[in-house]
Amino acid sequence: MLTKIWKHKKIAIAAILLLVAALLLTPPRQSWKSGETTVTLSGDRTTYKISGKGAMEDYEIPGWWGGAPPYIWTKTPVISSIVSLIFGYAYRFEVMDIDIENEVISRFPGLVSVLTKSTVTDLVIGKGVTHIGNWAFYRFDRLTSLTVPGNVESIGYCAFAQCANLTSVTFEEGVKSIGGFLGCTGLTSVTIPNSVDTVESLSRRYGAFFGCTGLTSVTVAADNPRYSSEDGVVFDKNKTALLWYPQGKQGAYTIPSGVIIIKDGAFSGENVDYFHEGMLESSGRTSLTSITIPGSVASIEGAAFDDCVNLTSIAVAADNARYSSEDGVLFNKDKTVLIRYPPSRQDTAYTIPNGVTSIGDRAFYSCGNLTSVTIPNSVTSIDEYAFSHCVKPVSAAAIK
């Protein structure tokens, strides 16, 4: 009986080894259709060329439990299970480019990706292409520079996500919508042309430049009708709304007088770490250390300072009618609501001033050093997420 079982095991092992060898030795396709375009891989496997007229296909990232990519699930479910077992996590997340017929477009999973994706250093976008597909060039690690011609009206969600060595991107006049550079940590500066009217989820999680921790400056062309920039920071056209502070911009920052609104997530600094259930997960990282809010600011939207883990102090101008600060902590004007405690403040203990009645949403979010908080008897409400994501356990004591 044992001999028979061992014989079957040897057959199974041999089958797996043959499968791996077949995957490793099978060359990638040199040309394929993607929506209304054709994608061609050069003979030396260093350049992709997108040609034709119209839009590329939009692709989807497989989920955590999605196993192998759809083309394997559909055509060979048994092999799919074996391959998922062999390559596990790495396999499931390497194949992103899948065409409408559920066939592999450009790269193979796991170890086999070295045959294509890891060798591509250049991308040539033809003059007839109007859209770069979602997830189309995810994790092309050797791509260092990119020029997006003006005929490309839109760049899809995560189209160039986590191209870690991409250091230079040029958007030519004519590009209208940007939405795909999440986690491109090598980018240090970006120029947005006049033609752009949409930068997807600019200041929020999973936005166009989410996780670009090396990005220190964004320049908006002077005649752009929707956006403007000053000192590398992005505002609306009239500079009354602060939209986005680049994650890599270091040190202290004073918001210009005249700004009325700090938008949701404007200073939120997060870094793409890994994929889980098809979504980007993150841990907070930003280089902002202190901020000064002028008297003109009348609204600070939710999550404006989420994950500013290096922020040590928030100052508010004395003539501000809506907000105030005390000892580097942000309050409303009459100091009845504690709005934000700087996450990188060095103190391990903090006593909330007497008279505060409410501890606001995410007030102590992502605090790195705080271990105890003394709450005065005046406090009547504490938001559910007031102490969420604190690095160390925080104990709270009430003043009787």
Image (cartoon, grey):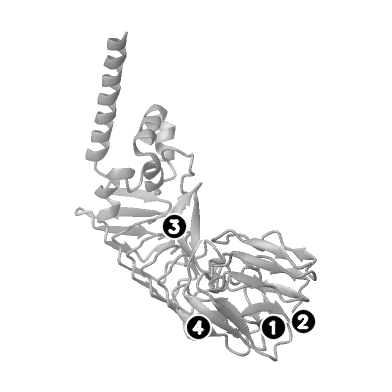
Q: Which residue is mark 4?
A: 252
Give how far apart the Cα atoms at labels 1 and 4 are: 18 Å
Q: Quadrant of residue 378?
A: bottom right
Say above or below: 51 vs 364.
Answer: above
Residue 147 pos. (x, y %): 35, 70
Q: Which residue is mark 1?
A: 324
Residue 9 pos. (x, y %): 30, 20
- What secondary structure is marked by label 4? strand
Give how far apart the Cα atoms at labels 2 and 1 are: 8 Å
Dot 2 or dot 1: first in sequence order is 1
> Of the residues shown, which amino acid type is indicated by label 4?
Ala
Dot 1 or dot 4: first in sequence order is 4
| Mark closer to the observer (3, 1) | 1
Taking the image as shown, residue 182 lies to the left or right of residue 304, namely: left
Q: Quadrant of residue 204?
A: bottom right
Dot 2 or dot 3: first in sequence order is 3
Camera-nearest residue between 320 and 381: 381
Residue found at the very far front of the displayed protein: 400
Q: Which residue is mark 3?
A: 273
Q: Quadrant of the C terminus?
A: bottom right
Taking the image as shown, residue 82 lies to the left or right of residue 192, namely: left
Dot 2 or dot 4: first in sequence order is 4
Q: Which residue is mark 2?
A: 334
Camera-nearest residue between 195 and 379: 379
